[in-house]
Image: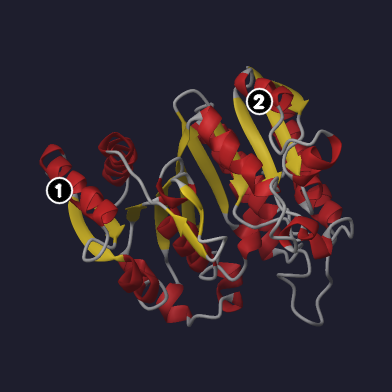
Amino acid sequence: MKFNIAVLPGDGIGPEVVQQSVRVCDAVAKIFNHTINWNYGLVGAAAIKKIGDPYPEETHSICLSSDAILFGAIGDPMFDNDPSLKVRPEQGLLAMRKKLGLYANVRPTFTFPSLINKSPLKKEIIDGTDLVFLRELTGGIYFGKRGRLDNGEIAYDTCIYSREEVVRLVKMGFELAKKRSKKLCCVDKANVLESSRLWRETVQSMEKDYPDISVSYEFVDAVAMRLVQWPKNYDVLVTENLFGDILTDEASVITGSMGLMPSASIGNENSLYEPIHGSFPQAAGKNIANPLATILSAAMMFEMSFGLKNESDIIKKIVERSLNNKIVTEDLSLEKERKYTTSEVGDFLVNEIISNKI
């Protein structure tokens, strides 16, 4: 098979971790006789510095003409520390989601046996956790009307959702739950927010179409607490943009490192795959960043965009082997253990694939 994949390395450690993911994909493609054409584009701070636009039209064209998108990270401290700037790297990510119609962020959270003790939570609480968040991406407070009043002394952001936006995400949640443990949780704040009441009543109206799915409704603050108390009670969770942004980062601590969790942003025409971690500018250029989340995101890409489960499973298998063999970067290594570089981890994974040790 032949694939055209857009590559958006982005900022900070993005280029380094994406490079290793591309190497792994090429190795997998070689043994399965696939051909991958990689098409690179600028996004975020890198695009602002060169073009003045965090999501240039050229990058958008590359994404539109690709079968899938592999993305690194966005963010640069020079923009974070100046609130007066009108153009910011994160605007590129929001624009990309909106223009490409990437409405559903799929974020799995699971544990690795070899890293169970890296989590700040007790083993008996987290061992066996396997849940998935579906976060709505193109609506809510990030896209609503915003502004300042009274000479800048008052600020406001508006959370707006249409029923259509809720339905398309929740439908995906129900369909995913059918393939898993048949449990779906709607996370909202319906006791306070009108937008959350729309979410809850929409999910309730859809329940009849999925009689085999057990549906629960929980307030976002309760889920924030229960995620670290009883994460194994959850399977598929659906929620709005802001709540999902916060809860998925919280869930990442279950695994012991944000450098391990992949994600996918699904749209009607295309899908984007990225690690859940940020740009980590302090580590940029030092060859110490953990590339495994980006590589696992590529595994999601093979399965979800191309329907190639065998290729996806091979990537997951060699990632777990690197963890078991402690071929890991400094964020996952113990004090007296060897700390492998980003590229050394990539070398190990590629060699395992091409030497047929899979």
- Classify residue 282 as left or right of residue 255: right
User: Is any atom of residue 68 visible in this view?
Assistant: yes
The image's mark for residue 204 is: 1
User: Is any atom of residue 308 visible in this view?
Assistant: no
Residue at the front extreme of this rendering: 150
Q: Tag 1's secondary structure?
A: helix
Asked which quadrant contains residue 38, the reply is top right
Q: Which residue is drawn at 67% across and 20% down?
A: 61
Question: Residue 123: x, y in percent?
Answer: 48, 79
Asked which quadrant contains residue 152, the reply is bottom right
Q: Vertical placement of 186 versus 137: above or below? A: below
Q: Residue at x 56, y 76 (%)?
A: 119
Question: Residue 161: x, y in percent?
Answer: 33, 43
Q: Give the mark nearest the N terminus, 1 or 2.
A: 2
Residue at the right extreme of this rendering: 286
Quarter of the image with the C terminus is: top right
The image's mark for residue 289 is: none
> Residue 353 versus residue 69: which sits nearer the camera?
69
> Residue 202 versus residue 328: which sits nearer the camera?
202
Q: Which amino acid does label 1 sit on?
A: Gln
- Classify residue 295 as left or right of residue 170: right
Check disc 2 and report the residue beneath it: 60
Q: Vertical placement of 276 versus 334: above or below? A: above
Q: Tag 2's secondary structure?
A: helix
Question: Residue 162: x, y in percent?
Answer: 30, 39
Q: Residue at x 36, y 68 (%)?
A: 232
Question: Residue 272: x, y in percent?
Answer: 58, 36
